[in-house]
Image: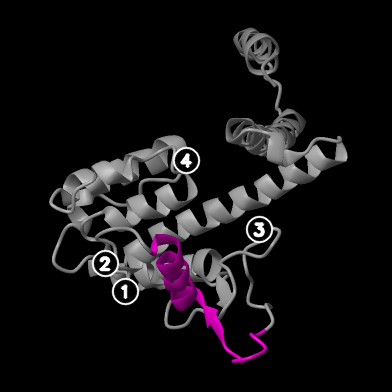
Amino acid sequence: MLENIGAEDILDRNERLILGLIWTIILRFQIDTISIPVGLDCYEPDGAVFSEDMEMDEETGERRHAKDALLLWCQRKTAGYANVKVENFTTSWRNGLAFNALIHSHRPDLINYESLSPQDPIGNLNNAFDIAEKKLEIARLLDAEDVNVSHPDEKSIITYVSLYYHYFAKQKTEMTGARRVAKRNGLYIRSISTTVILQIVGNLMQADQLQEDFETLCSDLLQWIQNTIVMLNTRRFPNSLKGIQDELVRFKNYRTVEKPPK
């Protein structure tokens, strides 16, 4: 529920309230869906992201939500990595190694973790951000210079790290789907190389992207059709030769330029 903000605050450009609104939206739709029962792995067996409807741990009756759940996930995935100790969403990320460890724990083929040095925080941060953007298509929401400070912005790091969580959770789901497809076709996934599996996952993700692009094109086409119908139905034909000639030029442009691409 949004409180203490109205349309007039946005029109008046109240930066404090607008930023609060943006954070509330991010929290609700990007972070609140993360909930990890204590004592279990970070994903469900089928790779689905935990939701707030997840049952509580039977022994402790506890369940971790949002910020705590994301922190727990980061701790589990970066455990054992040199010079990485994730205790918060501020200072624990300053030297950039935690970001690299998160990527390496899921995709060791993308990062040579042993070559990274805690003495080069800017290089580490840029390395992780570049790889995440180019190889994982995770938007670069942060700049290295903004993280390598005495106290980085917590909300910014939480938002960015949540993109990693959702990406790798989706990848795990795709991987499980690839395994099921392979088994249904009589293939034993254990005999398939990691490269082949990643290719299958990549193809599935590409299919998802093509579907999204198709839906966007269909939506744009329907909107164009509706706008064109309104335009054609509200035309007023001129009663002068010059006006008729102008209308013919516009109609020809519609038939030869505007309509064909649709």
Q: Are marks 2 and 1 in contact (CB under 8 Å)?
A: yes
Could you give the CA–CA distance between mark 2 and mark 1, rounded to whole angstroms?
6 Å
Q: Position of residue 74 (x, y in %)?
A: 42, 65
Q: Earlier in the sequence, mark 3 or mark 2?
A: 3
Q: Which residue is mark 2?
A: 92
Q: Which residues are magenta?
A: 56-79
Instruction: Look at discs 4 and 2 and give the one toward the viewer.
Output: 2
Taking the image as shown, residue 184 lies to the left or right of residue 217, namely right
Question: In the rendered image of this protein, does residue 62 appear above or below residue 152?
Answer: below
The answer to which image quadrant residue 157 occupies is bottom left
Q: Position of residue 93 (x, y in %)?
A: 27, 62
Q: Which residue is mark 3?
A: 47
Residue 87 is marked as 1
Q: How packed is label 1: few (under 14 Cα within 10 Å), some, or many (20 or more)?
A: few
Q: Earlier in the sequence, mark 1 or mark 3?
A: 3
**Magenta stretch encompasses residue 64:** yes
Kind of residue indicated by mark 1: Glu
Kind of residue indicated by mark 2: Ser
Q: Secondary structure at mark 1?
A: loop
Question: In the rendered image of this protein, does residue 145 appear above or below residue 246?
Answer: below
Q: Residue at x 60, y 48 (%)?
A: 171
Q: Which residue is mark 4?
A: 137
In which quadrant of the rendered image does the N terminus lie? Answer: bottom right
Question: In the rendered image of this protein, does residue 193 appear above or below residue 86?
Answer: above
